[in-house]
Structures are given as structure tokens and as C-alpha cells.
Amino acid sequence: MRKFLKGWKILFTLLFLSHVSAAQVVLPPFFNCNMVLQQGIPIPVWGWASPGEKVSVTFNNKTVTTKAGKDGKWSVGLQAMNYGGPYSMVVKGKNLRTIENILIGEVWVCSGQSNMEFNLSSAINAQAEIAASNYPEIRLFTVKKRIAQTPQEYLEEGEWWDCSPVSTPRFSAVAYFFGRALYEKLKVPIGLINTSWGGTIAETWISAGAAAKNPDFAPMLENLKKVDLKEYAKSVEKELRDRLGEYAATDEGTKENQPIWAAPEMDDQNWKTMHLPGYIEKNGLQGVDGIIWFRKNVDLDAAQAGKGATLELSKINDSDVTYVNGVKVGATEQKAEARRSYAIPEGVLKAGKNNITVRVEDLGGSGGIYGEANDMKIVTNEKTIPLAGDWKYKIGVLKITTSLGPNSYPTLLYNGMINPLIPYGIKGAIWYQGEGNAGRAFQYRRVFSDMIKDWRKQWNQGDFPFLFVQLANFMKPDSIPVESTWAELREAQFKTLALPHTGMAVAIDVGDAKDIHPTDKETVGKRLALWALAQDYGVTTPTNFLGKIPGLKSFFSKPVVHSGPLYKSMKIEGNAIRLTFDHVGGGLIAKAGPLKYFSIAGEDKNFVWAAAKIVGDTVVVSNPDVAKPVAVRYNWADNPDGNLYNAEGLPASSFRTDDWPGVTAGKR
């Protein structure tokens, strides 16, 4: 097997070098027009040429020369520069490359899973935000999704875009709002590199060297070395066809561009049944991507016939075309997080049986009609007809994905989407991920910390800033204190603040009970930016008018308040517990009423709701039925509703004072 992998590596190298030889000097795609280079540090530039070829790089009237090695790779270090531009760069070997419109500024890597990938076009006030997103000195680069069995050095494609209404709709909303907040305060060029993939787990973003030191992952890495990608593809294809049978390569539900499977009179008795809402992967179609048709019949009375109505289908991953009685009523393309709501025109509905047909296209990962059962319905003036329940379904096109998935093994996305970026000069990284690891939250304490340390080691730029988003509130609220995997994941994130130069944006108040992808990404981006502005850029707030005078600023200003209250310590005082906090800012406040979502327990570890009150910069918690309290928890739930903030309007992180084993202890 090792000979097989080595052979493929040699073949890839030969193919790549033949491409290099034909094109002479080759640069990674992020060394291109409109790029932003990090200020204040030596600037690394690298690429490929013919082995032994002399290469020169001219930038800011200075030229550095080198020679390509035996493997064709070359690299140079340019002199550190301050903010500015635009500049041009000339790279010369046997050929000549000129790169225009280069800015020197602040470069941030933006990574994680779907809430980082989440596009600006799906955020709150998207239309207005996109129209106003004209910032020529903010530059955007998106890394193409790629899985790799071994570390890759070259990205397949990519280009820098000026931030404008043309480029922002498909760019990360969190990254955009973060970069805009920095730009508005610093007034310097900002470069944002978005390298994210929805639904991914943290360990796929870690290098093999770091993952191998974790006993939970070391055996998986050994197995990855043995994977024969050709044989893997064959086995996946055989398993799917054995389980699902043969399916056409083109959509059987469409004939001559007509949706024949949407015809109300079509016989669907032999179709299989699936309970919706729910992902297809959890309903017998694991491993399936492609086009799946869903049909359901509902009965309406004469009073509802002929009148207009609204069809609501919760959310559909990824795209859909929807028909009522054969009439197309709506379609949405590649908006997996968007709730579908389509108007049914007058005259379409009839008395008796009515047919609803939905053609779903699943492009990869989870797919189907999913979300809350209450969000699937027909709404008329007379009543609401629920649509959750059994639907008929049939596969129109079976798209067999015969490659590894991003979560199949650790390291796959590090190899394909992080390693090729290194050692591009950066200021730091922002990260929004954790949902994929919530079931293994206790393990995440080590995994996440290892990942941060690993990236810093690989980049070799010291302990660069690493800022992350704590999971937002999500799922059904609880009426009593309960255990929670999401609360434990938030705790793991909180504990990661022990690493130097880290920061955590609390998002516990901007989530959505019904949507794992909350649309308020502006608040998240701004809260991340507060950490960067305070910790990494030294931005301060005047304490009085003298603080606005440059010479007196250091005497009459204070650091920007960048975090909500973070639990520090507890003290038992009789039948109460007093809590102290860091980052109280201008003082602790209870937002919109008395403090809530505090619970307290005695030695029996039975938590009950508690009364809590602010006393100075502390919170005192008690319950008359708990005479000898030993522990307090705050916002300890999937979807809590606590209201402890500081005067600057930043929410407190959830926390617990106990260290009793949680529900994810021992989960691997």
C-alpha cells in the first residue's frame, strides 16, 4: 500500500512539474491581483519553476533573487512594510508575472463549519447590506472546498475580489462583518481568506502531526494511510447500488423539460414512504446525493377550493422546485438554511384531493426537507392544514459520491484547505465551529486547543490571535434545569481562553431555536472584532474629553470593553453562593427584568432554579429549598434565556462552578 501511495505521489509530482515546466514560474492563486499582504512582518512569497531556474521577485523597488530547488519549489522573504498601496509585484523566471493592485494591511484567516460558510446573501437585511458593501480596501478570497489524503502545497483555484455588491453575496457573512468592523475603526486595508466547510468536525482541520499525538485519532490516521482511493470509490458505489438498485444518470422525473412526476394524476403507489421533516440520510438514504422527488396528497373542502393560500415547507437542503396540482408555485436554489414559503395562486386548489410535489436537489452532505414539523403546512383563510408526516418519495438521479467525506478521517481539510495557505503572512484567525463536535464536547477541550496550537506551529508566526465564536442558542428551550451537550461544548470553548492571545465572542443571545444557522451574523462579526481591536490593535475609549487629545490619550482613555462577563470564582456564604466575574465593564446589569436562568444545587447534585441578584460587581444566588448549596450554573442548556450582561451590552458566557462529569464525558 505504501508503494501504491508513493507511486501516486511521484506521478502527481511529475504531472505538476510538467505543468510548471510548460508555464515556467507558477504562483499559488492567492499571489494574484488585488491581494492583501500582512503589514509589519517579513512577507513570504513562493511558487514553482523548472528545477534550478533562477527566479527574482521585485516589490516596492527592491529585488530578491533565488533558485528553484530540485522539486521545482522556490521561496523568498520580502522586507516588512507598513500599511499602504496599491503596489505592483514582478516575478521573473523564464517568463514574467506582473501582479497589480496589491495592498499592505491586515490579513485574517476565517474558518470553521456552516456558520462561518453562511453567505451574506442569507443574513438579516441581506439586500441592504449587500448594496452597501462597497469597500475597495477590503479584499476577499475564498478557498475552494477540497479533501486531501496527504498535505497539499497548491490550491487548485481562487482569486482576490474587491469587496463590493458583486463579490459579497456569496462570501462568508461573519467574515465580512468582522472585516468591515476592523476597517471602519482602523482605516487600513483588510484581507479576508475564507476557508470553511459546513458540517465539519474540528479534527479534520488538524495536521497529521498533531492528530497523531491524540490517542483518540492515532488509529484513524493509520487507517487513512491504508486507504486506496480507487478501491474506496468502487466499494462505495457497490454498496449503494446493492442497497438502492440502479438509477438513471439523468432525472427520470423530467421528460422533455416537463416535470412528469409532478402531475397530480401520476401513480405513485409503488413509491417508498418517508416521514418528513427529516434529513434523507436519517431515513434510509445514507450516502445518497442527487435528485429526490417527494409527493403528498391533502384533502380540502369546498370552502378552501379556488382560493389563494400559502405553502410552507420548513427548510430544504439544498435546492427545490415545488408544484401544487402540477402548477409550479416556487423554487429556491442552494439556500439550505432558508425556510420555504410559496404563494399558491387562486384557482390552483380544488375541493377534494390536492397534490403537492417537491423536487429536491441534494448537492452533498445532509439533504432533504428538514426543520420543525410545525413549519410544514398549507395556510388558508379558513384554517391551517399540517403537512408533516408520511410523504411518498422516489430518487430521480442518484449521484454517487465515491470520494472520502470531509469528516471521514482527521486531517482531510487541513491537508486540502489549510496547508496550501501556509506560510502566507497573516495577522490571525477567526473560527466558528463546534456544532459538529457537540456530542463529544468533553473531548473537544483537547481537540480545539490542539488545533489552535497546531496552526500556530505550522504557520511559525508565533502565537497569532485566534478568535472564536461560542455556540449560539439553539433547539427547544427547557422548562427545568437539564444536562446539555451544547452547554458542555460552550464550556470547552470557554476553557480554551486559557491559551494566550485567544478571544471568544459570545453568541448566546442571537441564535434561533428552530435554525442552527441564525441569520444575525453582524452581531457575531462585531463581537469578534471587539476582541481584535482591544487585544491586538490596542484601540481605546476616551474616559473624558482629554482622552481625544493625541498626547493625552494614554492617560485619559481605557481599553475597549470587548467581552461580556466571564465567570471567575465562587464563594459559599451560608445558604447562598456569591459569584465574581472578569470583564464586568461598566458594571453588571440584568437585561429586561430580574436575573434568570441561574440554577443551584447541593451535594445531591440536583439543580433547581434559583433567585439571583446583582450586588456590586458580583451575583448572589440562592434557593430557600437548598440550605447547603455547593454549585451554581448559568445558561446551562441548549437554548437558554439568561439575561446577565455588562453595561456595554455584551452578554455573559454560560458557565458552571462544578466539575461533575457531564453527558459527554468519555464520548469519543
Image (cartoon, helix red, strand yellow):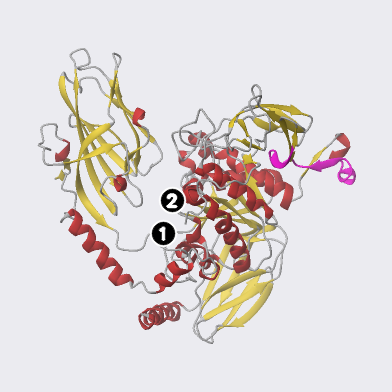
Task: Name above or below for residue 125 compared with residue 101.
Answer: above
Q: Which mark is residue 199?
A: 2
Q: Of residues 420 and 280, which is closer to you in this image?
A: 280
Q: Of residues 579 and 369, which is closer to you in this image?
A: 579
Q: Amino acid at mark 2?
A: Gly
Q: Secondary structure at mark 1?
A: loop
Task: Specify whether residue 322 is in view.
Answer: yes
Residue ID for mark 1: 406
Which image quadrant is residue 193 in? bottom right
> Start and end of the magenta stretch?
549-571
The answer to whether residue 374 is left or right of residue 538 is: left
Task: Name above or below for residue 470 compared with residue 375.
Answer: below
Q: Secondary structure at mark 2?
A: loop
Task: Name above or below for residue 318 compared with residue 298.
Answer: below
Q: Which mark is residue 606?
A: none
Query: Residue 22, how many percent across, how many down?
Result: 42, 79
